[in-house]
Amino acid sequence: MNSASSGRWSELVAPAYLAASLTLMLAAAIFAFNAFLVSTAMPTAVGELHGEAYLSWTLTVYIVASITAGASAPLLKARFGARRCLFVASGVFAIGTLAAALSPSMELVLVGRAVQGAGEGLVAAVAFALIPQLFPSRMVAKLFGAEAIVWAAAAFGGPVLAGVITEFVSWRAAFLVNLPIVAIFLVLV
């Protein structure tokens, strides 16, 4: 298979595709970094808030909300458009992040995690659905490869970053690391 039919990595950063590539990679980064940052900081949050009984729920409510919102993505995208869905969903994720990070109790952390999950589930599903609309088929594998690199960076760097921030600042600060990524994502959307 020649490189013209399989796409080139350099095409992802060509002027015609750069903004779309960055936007979709940031959509993956929000999900990936959140997963690793929160999972690393959560035991400290649970200990501080005396919420040991809720530890497993912090992931459960996030995943359930994420799946539910993701399942609604085709309908919402068709009705409101991808840009509006991504903008609102990333705002919902940011609100959930703030709610969880600033929460005085584990019950409210769970509410924040559910809101985060709903926002991220919609972001991920809409971003995934946009791939064939924004890129020719020859570039799809390269884009998925770039997103895999984002996940690998999050898997390697997320726990280290969260551990350092949790140790030297607080678990709340580790939750907030995603907000600058969301801000850049909003600008690109």
Image: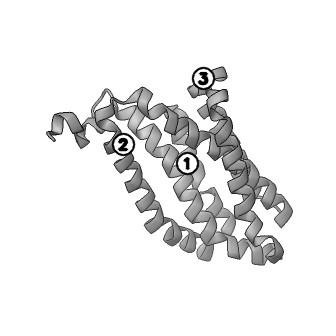
Q: Earlier in the sequence, mark 1 or mark 3?
A: 3
Q: Position of residue 136 (x, y in %)?
A: 33, 29
**Amino acid under disc 2:** Leu
Side (left or right) of 82 relative to 150: right
Q: Earlier in the sequence, mark 1 or mark 2?
A: 2
Of marks 1 and 3, the one in the foreground: 3
- Asked if residue 140 is positioned above or below residue 39 in the image, the reply reads above
- Mark 1 and mark 2 residues within 8 Å of each other at the beta carbon: no
Q: CA distance from mark 2 to mark 3?
A: 22 Å
Query: On the image, numbered disc 1 is attached to which residue?
Result: 180
The crowding category of the residue bearing disc 2, from other C-alpha atoms within 10 Å (few below 14, some 14 to 19, many at least 20), is many
Query: On the image, numbered disc 2 is attached to which residue?
Result: 143
The crowding category of the residue bearing disc 3, from other C-alpha atoms within 10 Å (few below 14, some 14 to 19, many at least 20), is few
User: On the image, which quarter does residue 140 sit in?
Assistant: top left
The crowding category of the residue bearing disc 1, from other C-alpha atoms within 10 Å (few below 14, some 14 to 19, many at least 20), is few
What residue lies at 49% left-to-right and 72% top-to-bottom?
160
Of marks 1 and 2, the one in the foreground: 2
Of 3 and 127, which appears nearest the observer? 3
Q: CA distance from mark 1 to mark 2?
A: 22 Å
Color theme of the render: one colour
**Amino acid under disc 1:** Pro
What residue lies at 31% left-to-right and 44% top-to-bottom?
142
**Amino acid under disc 3:** Gly
Q: Secondary structure at mark 1?
A: helix
User: On the image, which quarter does residue 139 sit in?
Assistant: top left
Q: Residue furthest left?
A: 2
One can see residue 65 in this view: yes
Q: Earlier in the sequence, mark 2 or mark 3?
A: 3
Q: Secondary structure at mark 2?
A: helix
